[in-house]
Image (tube, rainbow, N blue to C red):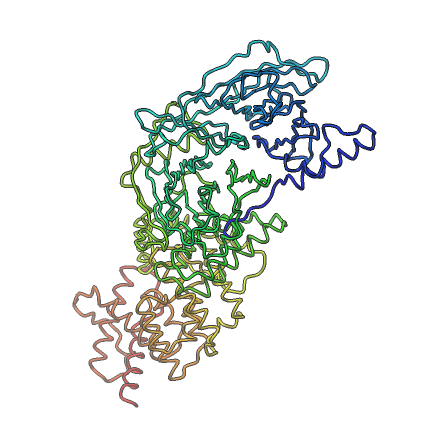
Amino acid sequence: MALRLVADFDLGKDVLPWLRAQRAVSEASGAGSGSADVLENDYESLRVLNVERNGNIIYTYKDDKGNVVFGLYDCQTRQNELLYTFEKDLQVFSCSVNSERTLLAASLVQSTKEGKRNELQPGSKCLTLLLEIHPVNNVKVLKAVDSYIWVQFLYPHVESHPLPENRLLLISEEKYIEQFRIHVAQEDGNRVVIKNSGHLPRDRIAEDFVWAQWDMSEQRLYYIDLKKSRSILKCIQFYADESYNLMFEVPLDISLSNSGFKLVNFGCDYHEDRDKFSKHLTLCVFTNHTGSLCVCYSPKCASWEQITYSVFYIHKGHSKTFTTSLENVGSHVTKGITFLNLDYYVAVYLPGHFFHLLNVQHPDLICHNLFLTGNNEMIDMLPHCPLQSLSGSLVLDCCSGKLYRALLSQSSLLQLLQNTRLDCEKMAALHCALYCGQGAQFLEGQWRHRADLNTNRVLSDFLKIIQWISENVSACHSFDLIQEFIIASSYWSVYSETSNMDKLLPHSSVLTWNTEIPGITLVTEDIALPLMKVLSFKGYWEKLNSNLEYVKYAKPHFHYNNSVVRREWHNLISEEKTGKRRSTAYVRNILDNAVKVISNLEARNLGPRLTPLLQEEDSHQRLLMGLLDLICHIVETSWRKHNLHSWVLHFNSRGSAAEFAVFHIMTRILEATNSLFLPLPPGFHTLHTILGVHCLPLHNLLHCIDSGVLLLTETAVIRLMKDLDNTEKNEKLKFSIIVRLPPLIGQKICRLWDHPMSSNIISRNHVTRLLQNYKKQPRNSMIDKSSFSVEFLPLNYFIEILTDIESSNQALYPFEGRDNVDAEFVEEAALKHTTMLLGL
């Protein structure tokens, strides 16, 4: 399945055996039945109450006397601890413990059974207590009212030392939130007591709200109040220095006026009237460290035949409303859809019906979202009970008492990539799979220093992606698979480490997507941006504010444009061909950087590469250095699959089917990189050309050269001249290659080919260069004509002119180096060429 739920905690496995062991110890000591006694049927009363910021889990159960027992599971030590036993038959529905485990806050309701009324506060329905744990001492009543009260201790981010003051939030069904400040003192060793328990200072944090959510990890309170029937989302940030700030306000186009009262992540709702607070409306806020802020909303459904839900991408300035129709609706659809926070993604799913994975970082194009219907086996493996999404990708199943860590399964995404026929699912699965492995994180060398199984699995899955791409380069019709892989891999490999990188680098080769995704429709609308309420920002708030400033002032939003790269690319190629370059320092800087890139790539490679890349002095390709190693891995994967070896570099063999397959892959890589102006690793064009000579007929080969599919490099042509003998067929090939070379390279290659045709080309080029600026001058009568033995007067006259020009040039530029070509060489070449033409 695309979503993997890994159990971090299970009441049945992590708590129940410990309780049974406590019971056995109690019976062995003769203590008889005690507060820790748990019979088999008592397991039904065992349930999770809350998950604190440090990951500790508070649970409760009732012993055989009906007393309420509070326990804590430490997620770090994997140990259980008995916190408190309350000797009353009450029902607990909210509980929280401070970080030092010295204070316990709990809200309890009276039992509905006859004769079990609350003796402490007979006139109230809900009793909120503050209990001293070490040692068991005072019990202070904070609230005794007819409305429900939820409690939550604040956890400061600095936990290195106990704070003299604890802060406790009380959230009332009467639509107000208070903060109690509780001063504690340490007496007689470890004895911790509440100071001035008769009067605890309190602050009114919020009021007149209809919905609230607690972010335990980041210590944030989100709530919505209604102003003139408008839903205004607000956020309060609590700090370690006992202060708090209202961070922002933003209007939301949703209707909550008739939806009652709703709380999210303030513990687990187990109270008897929970149906009163659950009207199938789902609303939650998700954030991540990159500055994203998403509000996920699903209204109450009048009919289960069609589901509508919205995601407000606050950090992007727009919202998307999705609608999907359900097939085979059965009675098991009793709960609303579930939203899960998966960091860079948000998962929306209705068990047994659909699973929708939304890209939070790049929500503009729907092709970056993965939508799977109920026919997909990946959905059937997800729990069918409602799940509660906590911070840090934690998911709580209140029914079973299990705490999961929600992860995207790279292996399942790879399987989907291989099996699906839809381009949109291939696009989404590819991006999700690369994100799971953080792009090519192993290319950065991080994985080489770790030997754990998870890293090896990520590496294996990434190599499988490369192998699948090399085997299915033509599998997608809406986008170029190699382009998407190179860009997406590069993006995800640097995104998590570089701030604001998504505003600079492209994340996809696709700029528009007009094809609908089967089974879902959407409407995109602009939304109002939040009004930030503070002046200085740090951490997450600084990144969110940066995103909002970008949305506000960058309209239309900037997209990556390769015009600068294109211009530099063309300039470098033109300079390379003509021999005219910019300053020596500029070129040297480029080449020095290329040497560093190549050395880093070779250092990160665990074993020797089979492909002869990065092993030649090719200044042209070193000038165009870029995203190299991804391409190296694609070629290497194809090379290993077809079992090719270094002998491919020689021209004395015919092309095999394996060589043709690799040539095809390299051609597709070249097409993908050319349109994006992405550089290739040194040696790529040389290897590509050699394979082309092996595999293609001459006319096809020349067509590929003329159309730019094959780029003739000096290394490849030199090897061709040396490896091939001068048979008629090879002469035709060599001549066809030479005449297509840039002038500077062509002159150098001609000197390496000992052949009349080569001499002819050299002499023609020499004469052309001499005569370009020739101005007729009075003839020099001092020229020695004794060296001319040819009695062909036109040729004699022509040679006499060339000799005169050469002499004049030598007099004007005495220190200019000569190129071993003179009038005598031209004369000899002309005679040989004439002899060949006349068949003599």
* Residue closer to the observer: 628 or 125: 125
Give the mark count: 0
Q: Which quarter of the picture shows residue 404?
A: top right
Q: Residue at x 47, y 76 (%)?
A: 656
Residue farthest toward the bottom in the current orientation of the protein: 840
| In the depicted structure, whether residue 190 falls above or below residue 444 | above
Residue 704 as seen in the image, left or right of residue 199: left
Residue 454 as seen in the image, left or right of residue 790: right
Question: Residue 665, position in %: x, y?
Answer: 43, 66
Question: Residue 15, position in %: x, y?
Answer: 68, 37
Residue 499 as seen in the image, left or right of residue 779: right
Dividing the image into 4 quarters, which one contains the C terminus? bottom left
Residue farthest toward the front in the current orientation of the protein: 114
Q: Which quarter of the picture shows residue 363?
A: top left
* Residue closer to the observer: 520 or 751: 520
| In the depicted structure, whether residue 26 falls above or below residue 782 | above
| In the depicted structure, whether residue 325 falls above or below residue 767 | above
Question: Residue 639, position in %: x, y?
Answer: 50, 67
Question: Residue 75, position in %: x, y?
Answer: 64, 35
* Residue closer to the observer: 825 or 321: 321
Q: Which quarter of the picture shows residue 124?
A: top right
